[in-house]
Amino acid sequence: MSATARHVFVRGRVQGVAFRWSTQKQAQGLKLVGWVRNLEDGRVEAWIQGPSGAVDTMLDWLEHGPAMARVDELETRPAEPEPLDGFEVLPTAATA
């Protein structure tokens, strides 16, 4: 089965509301691989990879996030799958 990958940026009230940890839990439940991290500009960045149906389900969830979050914009870019194992919460990264 081929994997689908998406590079995602989420803007809104997405830091300080357990967004990364909730994203990790959702992704693990869907058997996806990838990572999620805060960006210094206030957005959350994620790499979502796995079967296309599970990726689509995850993207639908990311449009709203956890209960305390407010998603104003979800930017999704197609990406080439990478050799990843598991779904990690990474440290905050600088924005380009």
Image: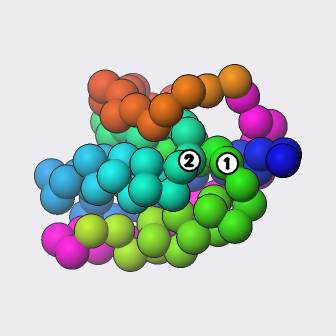
Q: Could you tell me if residue 39 is visible in this image?
A: no
Q: Residue at x 67, y 48 (%)?
A: 50
Q: Nearer the viewer, residue 29 or 63?
A: 29
**Residue 60 visible in rendering:** yes
Mark 2 and mark 1: Cα distance apart in space: 5 Å
Task: Let me know if residue 69 is in the magenta part.
Answer: yes
29 in the magenta segment:
no
Residue 33 in percent (x, y) is at: 56, 39
In the figure, residue 11 lies in which quadrant? bottom left
Q: Amino acid at mark 1?
A: Gly
Residue at the (56%, 47%) spot, across then down: 32
Magenta-tinted stretch: 67-82
Question: Label 1 near label 2: C-beta < 8 Å?
Answer: yes
Q: Position of residue 31 (x, y in %)?
A: 53, 49
On the rendered structure, is 77 left or right of 27?
right
Residue 37 lies, with reference to residue 25, above or below; the image says above
What predominant SS class does the magenta segment belong to? strand
Name the secondary structure under disc 1.
strand
Q: Is residue 13 left or right of residue 49?
A: left
Farthest-out residue, right? 2
Residue at image coords 54%, 37%: 34
Category of crowding for the residue at label 2, using alpha-carbon neighbours closer than 10 angstroms: few (below 14), some (14–19), many (at least 20):
many
**Residue at image location 45% in from the left, 71% down from the top:** 61
56 left or right, relative to 2 = left
Q: Earlier in the sequence, mark 2 or mark 1?
A: 2
Q: Which residue is mark 2?
A: 32
Q: Is residue 36 left or right of residue 14?
A: right
Q: Is residue 69 above or below residue 41?
A: below
The mark found on residue 50 in the picture is: 1
